[in-house]
Amino acid sequence: GNGSNTNEMSNGTNNGTSDTSQPPAEQQGNESGLVNLPENYTDDVIYTTVDRGNAHEKLYASPETIEAVQNGESIPDGTVLTLEIYRDEVLSDIFVMEKRSDWGDQPTEEQNGDWRFQAYNADRSLNTERDVASCISCHATQERDDYIYTLEEMKTFQLEDFTASDEDYTNPGVEDWK
């Protein structure tokens, strides 16, 4: 009885498969299948902008994602793309799409391939009014480009301009001593 339980627990703890250890995804709150708005997304690269009527859109991706695409690789698992929409020069909406191969048991009609979408308000609160079905149906037409509209812009973005302009952008502590 008790003796074997203790052994199992210590064994589990030693090899990292204990029931009490949480995978990183759960710590981020992704077990709900919700696409989270990254707190520091504005540290990413604005790799393209789009103007539609009075709306001005800024698209953010991590340098790692852009580098992978430019190296001919597919968009990496775990990629988060963030879209800010400005209407009459005021931030009105933030949309996020996240690519994960491990969304769990969520129904796949809620996503395109491994991508999911979420809408946020300008104050970064969850936009519960916005139905992301329109995001899904619209992006479904882009399957050959991994469901994104701006793959070409990613491929042609001058990443070295971004990295050269601020070589320490990956170090969050830099601002403290400047």
Image: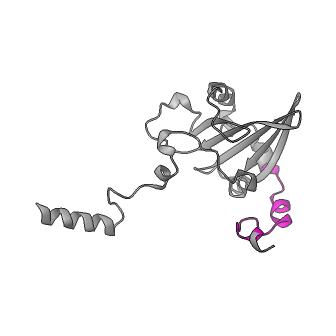
Q: Which one is nearer the viewer's eye here, 43 or 133?
A: 43
| Furthest residue in direction left, as rendered | 1
Q: Is residue 21 left or right of residue 146?
A: left
Query: Could you tell me if residue 78 is visible in this image?
Result: yes
Q: Which one is nearer the viewer's eye here, 154 or 120?
A: 120
Residue 163 location (% of width, % of height): 80, 64
Image quarter hosting the C terminus: bottom right
Give the colour scheme of this rendering: one colour
Residue 55 location (% of width, % of height): 85, 32
Query: Could you tell me if residue 102 is visible in this image?
Result: no
Asked if 55 appears above or below 47 in the picture, the reply is above
Instruction: State yes or no: residue 161 in magenta.
Output: yes
Residue numbers of the magenta segment: 155-175
* Residue under the point 71% across and 56% down: 71
Residue 127 location (% of width, % of height): 65, 32
Q: Residue 100 occupies which quadrant of the picture?
A: top right
Q: Is residue 31 left or right of residue 12?
A: right
Residue 37 location (% of width, % of height): 64, 45
Q: Is residue 104 left or right of residue 138?
A: left
Image quarter hosting the N terminus: bottom left
Q: Which one is nearer the viewer's eye here, 158 or 123?
A: 123
Asked if 69 appears above or below 129 in the picture, the reply is below
Q: Is residue 113 left or right of residue 31?
A: right
Asked if 174 appears above or below 145 in the picture, the reply is below
* Residue under the point 71% across and 65% down: 170
* Residue under the point 47% across and 43% down: 31
Instruction: State yes or no: residue 142 in magenta.
Output: no
